[in-house]
Image (spheres, rainbow, N blue to C red):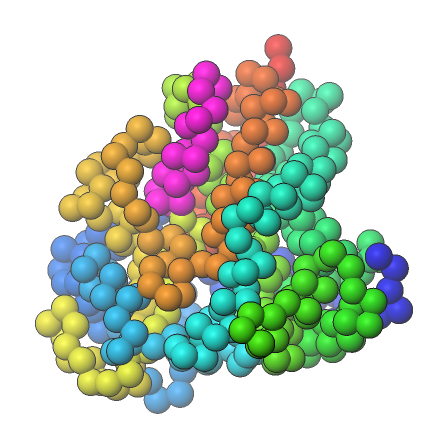
């Protein structure tokens, strides 16, 4: 859709938001042995997660910090909304995505607005997006390298397709796409907070004008749907709608890129399991869930104590912030035997990568559809897929968010 709305670039166009990933999220090769040591010591530790992993500590105003690694305690914090709140996110993503983000809300406010998002992201609608949006994007990208016999599946595929899907969902003009992605990624550069706030402001202005335009001339794009959908007489207020649109690129695009990259890396590291999927595509859903469990894209979630509580034997004062290490529960041997092994045939148990409780990821159905379509396309178009012997093997890195930077492969004869 052509639009009169125009997006603004950073005041400093030389700023690279993509280069700040390691600074913000770490580049540790394998944080799980350290996490296992913590869990053996105690289910809850004093202090925040970041400095324990060698990263600069987050800055929160006069808040005690705790790190939660025990699975029972993780489940309690994520589901006990009487004692634990999502308001901790007001100090980071609330500052950039906006305080109208449902990620910073508690019930009843959270439930009131979430039901509108849930109506739009129902599985039957997401399935249609898979056919009409995801498939064309995936095949357009893959067509550029299928004839070459080799590729970097990160740079040429997984880093691109989830974001291209969002551009199509929002029906953004092609001329706005590059600047849009730079601003969207820059919103989470909390180590350069001035750049994150600049991105937030410019995206807010852009989306406000875009929503006004789509309300006057609605289409079947996601902006029009969000602006014009109501449940029980409620429409999304501007603050909530704009905050959601700001967050979409990161919550949907970035995590799906990371999850798909990990999935493909794990399958190539375990060629017997990849062969099993080739022989039986019904194994694709369990492979996706195992990848999300084994090395989910977001290792840590944040909550705040609403009152003085005792958790894991520690006294937690009201207002304290808790780094909830979902990756610790996903690698707990008491839940998942031999947890460090990627195994699509293991007994299926629910993982923590989409969170739990009322804030379980509203976009989880779309993420699964995108990962499913991507893997089908890989199996359909890249026969005899294998690591490129002339290139370095991929390394999944990160302490907060995990991904390999490259995945060099060969395919065909």
Kindly indicate the quadrant of the structure image that contains residue 250: bottom right
Q: Position of residue 286 (x, y in %)?
A: 39, 34
Kindly indicate the quadrant of the structure image that contains residue 282: top left
Kindly indicate the quadrant of the structure image that contains residue 373: top right
Is residue 88 shown above or below 338? below
Quarter of the image that includes the C terminus: top right
Q: Position of residue 232 (x, y in %)?
A: 54, 73
Q: Does the magenta run of residues contain 285?
A: yes
Residue at the far top in the pictured view: 413
Residue 82 located left or right of residue 41: right
Q: Residue at x 44, y 20 (%)?
A: 280
Is residue 120 shown above or below 80? above
Name the residue nearer the viewer: 260 or 191: 260
Q: Position of residue 64 (x, y in %)?
A: 28, 82
Q: Residue at x 75, y 31 (%)?
A: 144
Residue 60 is at least partly visible in this image: yes
Q: Does the magenta run of residues contain 46?
A: no
Is residue 380 shown above or below 14? above
Q: Position of residue 136 (x, y in %)?
A: 71, 37
Magenta-drawn segment? 278-295
Quarter of the image that includes the N terminus: bottom right
Q: Residue at x 53, y 53 (%)?
A: 122
Q: Main secondary structure of the magenta part?
A: helix
Residue 27 is at least partly visible in this image: no
């Amino acid at each position: 859709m052509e639009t009169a709305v125009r997006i603004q670039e950073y005041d400093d166009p030389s700023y690279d938001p993509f280069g700040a990933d390691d600074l913000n999220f770490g580049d540790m090769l394998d944080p799980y042995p350290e996490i296992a040591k913590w869990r053996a010591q105690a289910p809850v530790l004093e202090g925040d997660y970041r400095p324990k992993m060698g990263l600069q500590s987050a800055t929160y105003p006069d808040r005690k910090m705790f790190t939660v690694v025990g699975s029972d305690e993780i489940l309690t914090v994520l589901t006990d909304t009487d004692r634990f709140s999502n308001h901790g996110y007001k100090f980071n993503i609330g500052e950039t995505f906006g305080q109208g983000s449902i990620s910073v809300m508690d019930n009843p406010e959270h439930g009131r607005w979430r039901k509108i998002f849930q109506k739009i992201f129902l599985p039957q609608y997401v399935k249609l997006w898979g056919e009409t949006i995801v498939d064309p994007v995936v095949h357009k990208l893959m067509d550029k390298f299928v004839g070459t016999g080799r590729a970097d599946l990160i740079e040429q595929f997984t880093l691109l397709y989830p974001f291209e899907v969002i551009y199509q969902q929002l029906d953004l003009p092609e001329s706005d796409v590059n600047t849009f992605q730079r601003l969207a990624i820059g919103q989470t550069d909390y180590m350069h907070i001035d750049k994150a706030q600049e991105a937030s402001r410019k995206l807010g202005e852009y989306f406000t004008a875009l929503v006004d335009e789509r309300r006057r001339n609605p289409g079947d794009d996601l902006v029009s749907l969000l602006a014009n959908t109501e449940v029980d007489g409620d429409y999304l207020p501007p603050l909530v709608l704009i905050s959601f649109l700001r967050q979409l690129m990161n919550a949907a695009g970035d995590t799906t890129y990371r999850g798909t990259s990990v999935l493909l890396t794990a399958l190539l590291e375990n060629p017997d399991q990849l062969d099993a999927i080739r022989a039986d595509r019904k194994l694709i859903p369990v492979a996706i869930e195992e990848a999300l469990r084994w090395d989910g894209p977001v290792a840590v979630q944040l909550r705040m104590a609403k009152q003085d509580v005792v958790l894991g034997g520690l006294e937690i004062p009201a207002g304290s912030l808790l780094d909830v290490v979902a990756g610790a529960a996903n690698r707990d041997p008491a839940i998942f035997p031999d947890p460090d092994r990627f195994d699509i045939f293991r007994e299926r148990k629910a993982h923590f990568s989409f969170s739990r409780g009322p804030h379980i990821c509203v976009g989880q159905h779309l993420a699964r559809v995108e990962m499913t379509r991507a893997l089908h396309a890989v199996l359909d178009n890249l026969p005899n897929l294998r690591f490129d012997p002339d290139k370095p093997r991929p390394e999944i890195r990160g302490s907060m968010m995990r991904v390999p930077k490259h995945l060099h492969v060969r395919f065909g004869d």
